[in-house]
Structure formats: C-alpha cells, structure tokens
Image: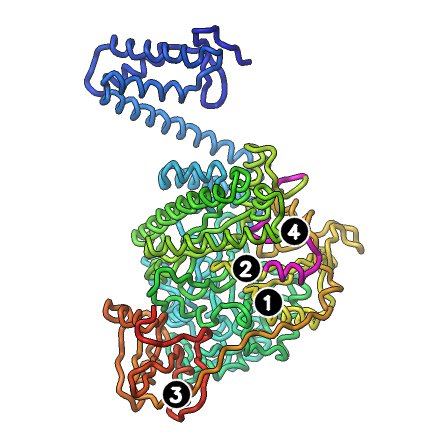
Amino acid sequence: METKSSEGEISQIRKRDGRLVKFDQEKITNAIFKAIQAVGGDDRTVAQSISDQVVSILRIFYRDGRVPAVEEVQDLVEKVLIENGQAETAKAYILYRAQRAKLRRQRSVMMDIRETIGDYLNQSDWRVNENSNSDYSLSGLLMHAAGAAIANYTLEEVYPPEIADAHRSGHFHIHDLGMGITGYCAGWSLRQLLLEGFNGVPNKVGSAPPKHLETALGQMVNFLGTLQNEWAGAMAFSSFDTYLAPFVRKDALEFSEVKQSIQQFVFSLNVASRWGGQTPFTNLTFDWTVPEDLREEHAIVGGQLIDEKYGDYQREMDMINQAFLEVMTEGDMTGRVFTFPIPTYNITKDFDWDNKNAELLFEMTAKYGLPYFQNFIRSDLNPGDVRSMCCRLQLDLRELRKKTGGLFGFGESTGSIGVVTINMSRLGYLSNSQEEFFQRLDRLMALAKNSLEIKRKLVKRNMEEGLLPYTKRYLDTLDNHFSTIGLIGMNEACLNLLGKDIATAEGKKLALQVLDFMRNRIQDFQEETGNIYNLEATPAEGASYRLAKLDKEKFPDIITAGEQVPYYTNSTLLPVGKTDDIFEALEHQEELQAKYTGGTVFHVFLGERMPSGQACKNLIRRIVSNFRIPYITITPTFSICRTHGYLKGEQPECPICHQPTEVYSRVVGYYRPVVNWNVGKKEELRQRLEYEVDELTSSLEHRPASEGKPESGSSLIQSYKFFFSDRCPQCSLAKAYVEKLDLPGENIDARTPQGLEEARKYDVRSTPTVLLFDNRGHPVEAASTLSEIKDAYKRLTENLPHRLSRKDSLDLVPGRM
C-alpha cells in the first residue's frame, strides 16, 4: 500500500516493477562513489555532498507527498553531477546505469525463458497458437523457446532501443522475430534447380540435375524443406507446370504415373518436417497455358537445354495440372485437405476457361477454396514479372515495383527481407487531428525503414559468412528482395480518429490518403537507401491480436474489433461483419487494393461450398474481368470427420457418427483447423459475416475491360539496340536471334555504368529488351521476350499496323525518364 511521505521527507521509492520500498539515501551515495572510483577518485565526501543535494531537490519536488521512481532519482543524480562540474563522473555513472540495466535484462531473459517453457507446457500463453501451422508438440516447444530467445537477442542486440521499444510497446510489429536474423519470404528459380541440381554446399550430400519427373519433384521437396529452415516465411516456385512438362514426355509417362509422382510430392510437402513441428510453408504458381516469354525457350531436362521448346508441351502441362488438381481435391485418406502447397493460378487473357482441367480447378475451388487467382486481366500486374524481376533495372529509384505471387508467393529469385506492420488504430486514437496522425505515421515509417535497413545488412552478413549456406548457394544477391512495410487496423483507425468506419466515404477517403502517403514515403526510402521497398496488406495472423491486446491494456477506451476478445481488422479491409454483399465489398476494396505493391488479397468468405464448379468459374471470371483486384480467393468453410470425410459448412459434430470433427477455414491466407487458431483469430471467425452463396450466381452488369490505344503504323526499321545482362536467363536466346537480323545494331550490357545510363535514356526497365529504330533514329517499338521480338520485327518490316506490345504503352523518346 502506498504511504504518502511527510512534507519535506522522502520515505518511499517506486521500483521499476511498480513496487514501493523504503527510501535509502545510502544506495544513492554508494552508486555515486562507485562512479567516482571508476574515473580514479577516492573522496567519498564528494559522493555524500552530491547525494545530499539530490535528496534536497527530491524533498522540494515531492513535497506534496508523491513517491519518486528509481529512474527519476537516477536522472536527477546525472543532472546534479554535471551542475557540480563532475562531467567525467557523470559519464561513469551513466555507464554504471547502462551496465545495471543490461544485467537486469539478462536476468529478465532467464526468467522469460522459464516462463516461456512453463507457459507452453501449460498452454497458458496465447502465442502457443500464434501460428496455426504449428501444433502443440516437443518440436513446437523447442522452436517456441528458441524463438523467444532469438527474439530477445534481436531486440536487445540488433536493434537500437527506439526500434525495440516501438515493437515492445505496440506502435508497430516486427514480424517473425523468432527468426529475426534471417529473411522473411523467398521465391526461388525452378529453372536454376533443374539446370544445376541440388548441391554445392560443402560437407552436404549433392544431387545432379534431375533427368526424370520423380527425381525433379524429389529435389523440389528437399530444396523447399531445406531452404524453409533458412527463412522465416513462405517458399515459392513459379511456372511449376511449364518447367516440369518436358520430363513427362521424356519418360513417356502415362497419366497414372504422373499422378502418382504428384501425389508423392504433395504428401511429402505436407509432412511436419520443418523444425518446430511445422509443415514447410510452400507456394506454387501454375501458368495453365505456356507463358509468352517461355514459348520460345528451349526446355531443360537433365541439366541440359534440349531441342524442343516449352511452347511444344501444352499437352504435358495439362497432364500435370490434372494430376495436381485430382490429388488436391481427393485430400488424404480421411478426406482432410492439403494445406500446402498453396496453388496460385495466373488468370491471363489467354487463360483457357473451357479446358477440361478448368472443371477440375473450379470444382476443387468450390469445395475446398485452396487456390489463389492472380488477376492479369484487369489489374496492373505483368505476367512476365514472375520470371523477370531478377532482370529488372532500377533506373528510377522512385519506381514502385509490383510483387507477384499473392500474399505468400514471389517471382523467381525475389522475396522480402522482413516485414514491419504499423498499428494504425493506435495512431488514430493518439492523434487529435489528421495532421497529427500523418506526422506520427511519418515517424513510425522512418523507424520501420531503419529497422529494415539494419535487418538487410544482418541477413546479408549472415549469408556471406555461411550461416545460411543454401541461400548463399542459390541466391547471389539480395538486391531483388523487398523491404516490406504494412499496416493493420485502418478500419479501427477511422473509428478512433473520425468516429466513422472505413465503409463510409470519409473513412475510405482517409484510407486512400494513408496508402498514398505510405507509397510516397517508400519511394523516398528507395531513393535514400538504393534498396527496393513495397507496401503490403500484411496477413498479421498474430499481430492482429497482439497489438489490439496491448492497446486495450494501455488505453482501455480505445476502439478495437471484437466483442469478447480484441483484435484488429487486417490492413484496409472492411470489418469482417460489415456486409454479405460480395459486389458491395468488391466495389469498396477495388481502389484500395490496387494501391498495394506487395501482397494483398480479396477473400470471398463463404459459409459452405459453392453449389458447383461452374458457378465458381462464373464468379471468378466476372471478378477478374470487372475489377482491378489483383488477387482473389474463394474461401468456403468446411468440416472433416475422421470416419465420414468431407462435410460442408461448419459442423463441429459429424451428423452421422456424432464424433467431433475438424472445422477448416482460411486463417489469414491458408487453410488450417480452427482449433489451431489463436484467440484473436477465433473471435474474428465468430464475427465473420459470410457472403450469401445464393447471391453469387446473380447477374452483374459487365464493365468492359479497358483496351490499349491502337498505335499507328511505322516506318521501316533501320537499326536496333539490344539490352542484356549476364544474370538474365532469357537473354542468350534473344541475343542469338537479334544478331541474325539483317540490321545494324548494338548489344548493350545493362549492368555496366554506361549501359545503365543508356537504358535510363530510353526508359528500358528490364532485360532482355530490344529497341527498334526507324530511319530517323527514333525508337518505334520495344520488345522484351523472344516471341515479342520476332513479332515486332516481322510486323515492322512488313509495315503493318500494330499495337505496342508492352502492357502500358510508352512514348519511346530519347531522354524520357
């Protein structure tokens, strides 16, 4: 119980943990004397004199009976030492304070470890279920305890106090601190693995490039599982069906053999083989039809380029897609869904909606909702970026690159170093005006940038020094890996600042202003650092609850989502219980989601499976044709009975045998049993208002997709400039073709200073790129794939009307920046 000091006397002092203890001036005197001794002094009377002055000031400051805190007394000691000309002693005293603070933290860490293990074993810590991909197990305990130690180390030894404090106090959330000394997510080059094999790390078993489908898939499993232990988040491969198709023909495989190999691959990826009792978090992107930039590429088998080209393998691609879809739809022996790999399908203008596999794809989606659909029809994503990001030229440091692959996928040889998510709700609560809101946001973004720059240097050093041996083997640079900044709780920010939610015109306007502000700041960060940044609607599986919980403890009257348990609405999404009208939600989210340059997604949450695959196909087609939403999922809730298999909707008990079931839904971007979710996400599910299934097949007035403006014909071409780089896998074929043209031209290495300057002059942003010039020396066409180059050359030499092949037409005028 707090006892007020008598006037003029100090009888108590408040410890750092809030306890009140008896005030003892002798402790102040001893601490000052130790500082005097540290600089060579031995006069205790000086220490006593300083101590007396400190106590006299305390009696004046706290004459109203208030109780001073330890830190306040120590601050006063420093001030009095300096005022008495004892600067050196003050420095020693400050060092003494710092050393004592470090000892306290070390003792605290030891206590934290004991508590961490005890809380895990007793399942009394919500973080046991922070990641729903991890089950309660001995492996889970080991990772939980080690992760807590690494997180403490990272906050104490890697980040400066202002960054660590911003995370601990909940101003923002630094993701995956349990693996805080390595990177976040990565997309790997399947082409490289097929060319080189899985090898090259000293003292580790190596495999030569695969010659058969089964061995290729086996190496992929080993690769993804091994690299997963060197990264915190998702591992991704692109063009799975395209790159593997040649192996099917090479061995003349029957469909049943292809399916058996795919089945083995999927089962292997769903084994909890990752440290911590987790399944490797994997993502595969499927092309469905051969991409334009790969059609003229020679296929790879056994590490060699063969005569056939990928464009010749559509039949084999169809076999792979059919096998994968059947395996995923069938599930395991009890009908349980396969959580991984998360499949992403590229919906391009060439997507074959009537392919026989489309029926399988959309039936699987209607039932299980597994895939992500990447919208290349109406969004401003570029299909070629999946493979060409590593060949991008950073001509304009303010250019914001678009990440491909959805929330958890990345293009080849790209990824994210780390993610920092800003707590928007707290900003709204603390700010008295929008001006103050943006000032606070600006400060937090600067701190986030500093933390990401520190982490980039740390990961680079760890990679170079051998801590991440397989990453070092298969990734020669981190230049194409983003520093990612995200946000959470924008809906609650609107409520706390404006008194209106994000669904209102005022709320949406503020959200758009916030995204524009954040985009502008990450452009500034790119200019300042030379590193690429992106803005992401971060999944925030654990941060959603953690930040809301902290805020409720600090500010009991702050507005959060949740009635029984607090949580924050993800990014700039509508609150989960706002509407059951899907098109109302799409209309609201379209402009917002198009602002993100990192991962974002629109989940079509359903209470149960869609009535048919055809209905599912119609819905997806309408969305991608009418909305600029870049990524879409269909997310039905379903249940699994160990005996009777799949049950539609949420049925905690099997209606046949009355045994408990496993209820599945998408937690943030992937399916896991609801029982594994943390308490915040369970509360979100409880409040979730699903879209009405019956309404999803209703008519939607079609909004025509915008067409590019047709370009006029051109003069006959007279010369070319070919931009290439050694890192570019497509450059060699394009270069060989260009050099055979009956044209004078110039080959320019875009990675050299002179080449980069020339690329900047013509606004060439990736390799390979060919510019074709007319007889006046004006560029009249740009082409970036072998098929585009061939088409452009044929068209222009025949002087045919044409349309620029780039998605966004460029005025190819020298000097354009």
Q: Mark 3 points at which residue?
A: 714
N-terminal label among 4 and 3 = 4
The nearer-to-camera label among 4 and 3 is 3
The nearer-to-camera label among 4 and 1 is 1
610 relative position to 285: left or right: right
Mark 2 neighbour density, 10 Å: few (under 14) some (14–19) many (20 or more)? many
329 relative position to 60: left or right: right
Mark 4–mark 2 Cα distance, whole angstroms, equals 16 Å
Mark 2–mark 1 Cα distance, whole angstroms, equals 10 Å
N-terminal label among 2 and 3 = 2
In this view, the residue in front, 674 or 528, is 528
Q: Do the residues labelled 4 and 3 touch (CB within 8 Å)?
A: no
Determine the secondary structure under disc 3: loop
N-terminal label among 4 and 2 = 4
Give, as a single range, the part of the protein colored magenta. Answer: 564-589
At label 4, the amino acid type is Val
Q: Mark 1 points at which residue?
A: 627
Q: Which mark is residue 593?
A: 2
Q: Do the residues labelled 2 and 1 touch (CB within 8 Å)?
A: no
